[in-house]
């Protein structure tokens, strides 16, 4: 029960800690709608202040972000990672694109001293700009579910819908590092 309280407190406290971060040159602002209790869905907005992207040799876009938060209660550091793999890029006016389609694989990891939770899912993301120094992507619809946990951390989100806006700077090294850290932590 304590781990659920920790994650819920994290989500509740994050909005106050990160207010106004959307104006930065790179950030990912996501809205999670958790259906852990299907009768009372909980909406939470999270902002990752540092967001980077890279393009792999096949042309797929990988957007990665990380954020660290210290909770007020126990002064515990909570580390969160986001990886959005955009593998199909629709072209307006040329490609039929429906937001109910999936063109993106999403991974979200929450790591605390109590354990780690890995959520994965799919979604529809639409690049609003062409790749350059900066890339803007609208994540119009996505779904996440718990895939694995370690330690005493339990599923605090349940089935979750996710949407948002990602503004990532082109930094292949940072995007690869965040993705690697996510994979190492999720594999523990």
Image (cartoon, grey):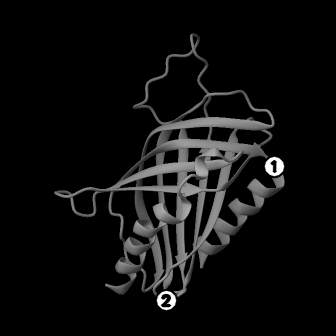
Marks 1 and 2, how far apart in space?
A: 34 Å
Q: Position of residue 131 (x, y in %)?
A: 75, 32
**In this figure, which residue is indicated by the disc labeled 1?**
171
* Left or right of 61 on screen, residue 138: left
Find numbered disc 2 in the image and state the secondary structure of the residue it sits on.
loop
Q: Residue at x 71, y 62 (%)?
A: 178
**In this figure, which residue is indicated by the disc labeled 2?**
74
Q: Position of residue 96 (x, y in %)?
A: 50, 16
* Left or right of 152 on screen, residue 116: right
Question: Is 126 rendered above or below residue 121?
Answer: above
Q: Residue at x 65, y 42 (%)?
A: 167
Instruction: Estimate how packed mark 1 is, as few (under 14), some (14 to 19) or many (20 or more) residues with alpha carbons within 10 Å.
Output: some
Q: Residue at x 68, y 27 (%)?
A: 129
Question: Is 146 rendered above or below residue 86?
Answer: below
Residue 61 sits in which quadrant? top right
Q: Earlier in the sequence, mark 1 or mark 2?
A: 2
Identify the residue at the far top of this view. 93
* Left or right of 89 on screen, residue 72: left
Q: Circles 1 and 2: CB distance less than 8 Å?
A: no
In the picture, which quadrant includes the N terminus? Answer: bottom left
Q: Residue at x 59, y 47 (%)?
A: 22
In the picture, which quadrant includes the C terminus? Answer: bottom right
């Amino acid at each position: 029960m304590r781990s659920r309280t920790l994650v819920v407190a994290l989500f509740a406290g994050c909005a106050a800690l990160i207010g106004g971060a959307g104006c930065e040159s790179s950030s990912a602002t996501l809205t999670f709608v958790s259906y852990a209790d299907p009768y009372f869905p909980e909406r939470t907005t999270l902002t990752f202040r540092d967001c980077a992207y890279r393009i792999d040799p096949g042309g797929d876009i990988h957007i990665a972000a990380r954020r660290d938060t210290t909770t007020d209660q126990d002064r515990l550091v909570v580390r969160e990672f986001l990886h959005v793999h955009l593998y199909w890029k629709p072209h307006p006016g040329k490609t039929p694109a429906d937001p109910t389609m999936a063109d993106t694989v999403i991974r979200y990891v929450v790591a605390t001293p109590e354990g780690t939770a890995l959520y994965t899912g799919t979604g529809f993301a639409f690049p609003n700009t062409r790749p350059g120094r900066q890339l803007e992507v609208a994540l119009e619809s996505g779904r996440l579910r718990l895939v694995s946990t370690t330690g005493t951390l339990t599923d605090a989100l349940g089935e979750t819908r996710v949407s948002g806006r990602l503004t990532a700077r082109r930094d292949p090294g940072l995007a690869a590092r965040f993705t690697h850290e996510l994979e190492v932590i999720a594999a523990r």
